[in-house]
Image: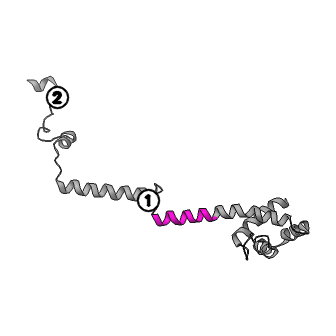
Amino acid sequence: MEQDKGDTGRRGVGQEGKAGFKERWRNARPTKTAVFWSWIASIVLTMIIGFAWGGWVTAGTARSMAEKMAEDAVVKRLAPICVVQFKQAQGKDQKLKELGTTESWQRSDYVEKQGWATMPGEEKPDTRVASECVSLLMLISK
């Protein structure tokens, strides 16, 4: 007569042989092979997520990124020297007007020809410094 009492601890009719998910999970005993491949899958998934979205990079990529950052920092430091050399030039107001009327793709060549992008101790001008110098000079001209 226990069935008539509605005992919630017991399974209903037809469910006596079926185990629930919790019970099957509790009774599961994975093999060494299943555990090994689960670890491998976890490692591979972690690497994919890390390199794709986590910002991980290889040593070679980190090295090239550091070199580019160092070069950019040097250019940022040398560009003001170029501006100082411009300010020491004769007829700087006229040359600034000429620079403003020059086509944008020729401006760094103009700065190089004037010698402003040639750093002290160097024999030839640096193209990247000239480009940054043009940006600074255009700010001055406004």
58 or 126, nearer to the observer = 126
Q: Farthest residue toward the left? A: 1
Q: Which residue is mark 1?
A: 51
**Mark 2 or mark 1: which is in front?**
1
Residue 25 lies, with reference to residue 38, above or below; the image says: above
**On the image, which quarter does residue 91 sit in?**
bottom right
Disc 2 target residue = 9
- Please tell me whether residue 32 is drawn above or below residue 116 in the rendered image: above
Q: Residue 127 shows which numbered tag?
A: none
Helix, strand or loop for the magenta stretch, by majority: helix
Seen from the viewer's position, the closer of residues 133 and 44 is 133
**Where residue 88 sits in the image (x, y, percent)?**
86, 65
Image: magenta residue range: 56-71
Q: CA distance from mark 2 to mark 1?
A: 49 Å
Q: How many marks?
A: 2
Using the image as rendered, state which of residue 122 and residue 106 is in the foreground: 122
| Residue in front for this viewpoint, 5 or 136 | 136
Across and down, in percent, residue 40 comes to 28, 58
Q: Residue furthest front?
A: 121
- Name the amino acid, label 1: Phe
On whether residue 64 falls in the magenta region, the answer is yes
- For label 1, the crowd category at 10 Å Cα-Cα, with few meaning under 14, some 14 to 19 and many 20 or more, is few
Height in image: 31 above or below 87? above
Check disc 2 and give the amino acid type: Gly
Q: Are marks 2 and 1 in contact (CB under 8 Å)?
A: no
Helix, strand or loop at disc 1? helix
- Return the x and y of residue 38 as percentages of the image width and height: 26, 55
Residue 36 location, quadrant: bottom left
| Residue beneath the point at 21% across and 55% down | 34
Q: Is residue 94 left or right of residue 45?
A: right
